[in-house]
């Protein structure tokens, strides 16, 4: 079977696991390294979470080793979700107070 | 019958012949179907994260305040436990493929044990909140600001849904052990275990985003 030849080795599972542990530790240490505003903290935290998610998707969920069909399906699903977020974000920002964007971010 | 012995063939665009396999043994189809289910999970949790982000934007200070009351040690411990459990779930799949059935079963048992520890910690966390009078529609909660009520509502809903997924995960892992014992999951036919591992990874993925948004935001603006 072609799936057996291109697959995760036990070593690879361990390597990805160690990187994920490192990133999780970074999640905890982040406030002590960079003490930022709410939006900075959230952005850094979500950036680390996204790296973790890509690693989990690529290696633990084998997307790196799948035929392109699977990857494209995931991209489409994520784009659909992103559209929901973008449309709702414009609502969250402009609702009732059209030009109040910067005051809100500065909270 | 001689007809059955002859493989049925189908030809791709390059004229290469492929044997049509039994539908019950459609490896790629089974995985594809399961991925479609995972997308429904993505939308389920994705929409809850959407609601969270909307209200977080509108009540940032209240969310930070409420987040500060959560127990970071318990939540953080659970983050590591879940990460460790996905590693063992991956190792069980790896060992089944390598035909190390005993090792695979041990890995699944470890995953189940870690999931139970996760739920026990979650139980103590929830109980601590409830002892403080914080639970949906409680008097103490309703006395708080609008943003804090929303934060705790989302906290109980999202970690609750996540907990239900952990419970279902434990159920399907026990099922996987039964299938391994009855030789229905083997080194040649492991799609059920592979799909369970995918499910467990998505449960972990939800927590990867859930943890920073609920527990770590309290450090912002300090």
Image: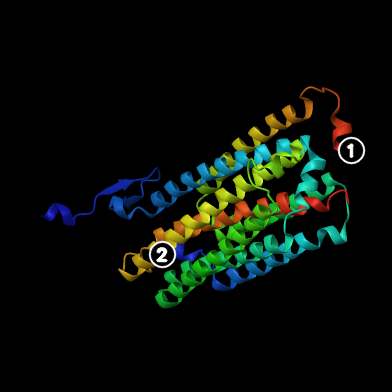
Badge 1 is on which residue? A106
Badge 2 is on which residue? B174
Residue drawn at point x = 40 percent, y = 74 percent: B99
Residue occupying the far front of the picture: B139
Decide if residue B194 is on the left or right side of residue B212: left
Residue A54 in view of the camera:
no
Decide if residue B39 is on the left or right side of residue B121: left
Hey, which quadrant is residue B181 in on the image?
bottom left
Badge 2 and badge 1 both on one subunit: no
Crowd tier of the residue under label 2, counting other residues whose Cα lies within 10 Å: few below 14, some 14–19, many 20 or above? some
Q: Is residue A83 above or below residue A41?
A: above
Instruction: Please tell me which residue lies in front, B158 or B108.
Output: B158
On the rendered image, what quadrant is the N terminus of chain B found in? Answer: bottom left
Secondary-structure class at tag 1 = loop
Instruction: Please tell me which residue lies in front, B29 or B81.
Output: B81
Hey, which quadrant is residue B100 in on the image?
bottom left
Q: Residue B90 — which label?
A: none
Instruction: Please tell me which residue lies in front, B20 or A9.
Output: A9
Crowd tier of the residue under label 1, counting other residues whose Cα lies within 10 Å: few below 14, some 14–19, many 20 or above? few
Question: Where is residue B52 shown, x and y percent of the image?
Answer: 68, 40
Chain letter for the residue marked with disc 2 in the picture:
B
Instruction: Please tell me which residue lies in front, B204 or B74.
Output: B74
Residue drawn at point x = 78 percent, y = 50 percent: B217
């Amino acid at each position: 079977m072609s799936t057996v030849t291109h697959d995760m080795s036990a070593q690879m599972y361990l390597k990805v696991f160690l990187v994920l542990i490192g990133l999780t530790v970074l999640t905890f240490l982040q406030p002590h390294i960079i003490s930022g505003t709410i939006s900075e903290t959230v952005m850094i935290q979500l950036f680390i979470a996204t790296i973790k998610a890509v690693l989990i998707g690529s290696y633990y969920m084998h997307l790196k080793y799948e035929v392109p069909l699977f990857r494209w399906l995931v991209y489409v699903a994520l784009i659909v979700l992103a559209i929901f977020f973008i449309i709702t974000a414009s609502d969250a920002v402009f609702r009732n107070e059209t030009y109040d964007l910067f005051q809100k971010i500065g909270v | 019958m001689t007809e059955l012995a002859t493989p049925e063939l189908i030809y791709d665009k390059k004229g290469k012949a492929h044997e049509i396999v039994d539908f019950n043994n459609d490896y790629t189809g089974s995985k594809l179907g399961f991925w479609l289910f995972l997308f429904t999970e993505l939308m389920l949790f994705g929409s809850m994260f959407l609601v969270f982000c909307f209200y977080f934007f509108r009540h940032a200070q209240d969310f930070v305040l409420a987040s500060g009351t959560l127990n970071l040690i318990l939540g953080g411990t659970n983050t590591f436990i879940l990460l460790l459990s996905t590693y063992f779930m991956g190792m069980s799949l790896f060992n089944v493929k390598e035909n190390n059935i005993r090792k695979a079963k041990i890995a699944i048992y470890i995953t189940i044990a870690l999931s139970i520890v996760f739920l026990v910690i979650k139980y103590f966390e929830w109980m601590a909140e409830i002892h403080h009078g914080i639970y949906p529609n409680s008097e103490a909660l309703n006395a708080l600001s609008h943003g804090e009520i929303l934060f705790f509502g989302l906290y109980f809903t999202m970690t609750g849904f996540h907990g239900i997924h952990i419970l279902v995960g434990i159920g399907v892992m026990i099922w996987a052990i039964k299938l391994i014992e009855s030789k229905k999951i083997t080194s040649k036919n492991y799609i059920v275990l592979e799909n369970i591992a995918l499910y467990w990874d998505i449960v972990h993925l939800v927590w990867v985003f859930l943890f920073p948004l609920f527990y770590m935001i309290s450090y912002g603006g300090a």
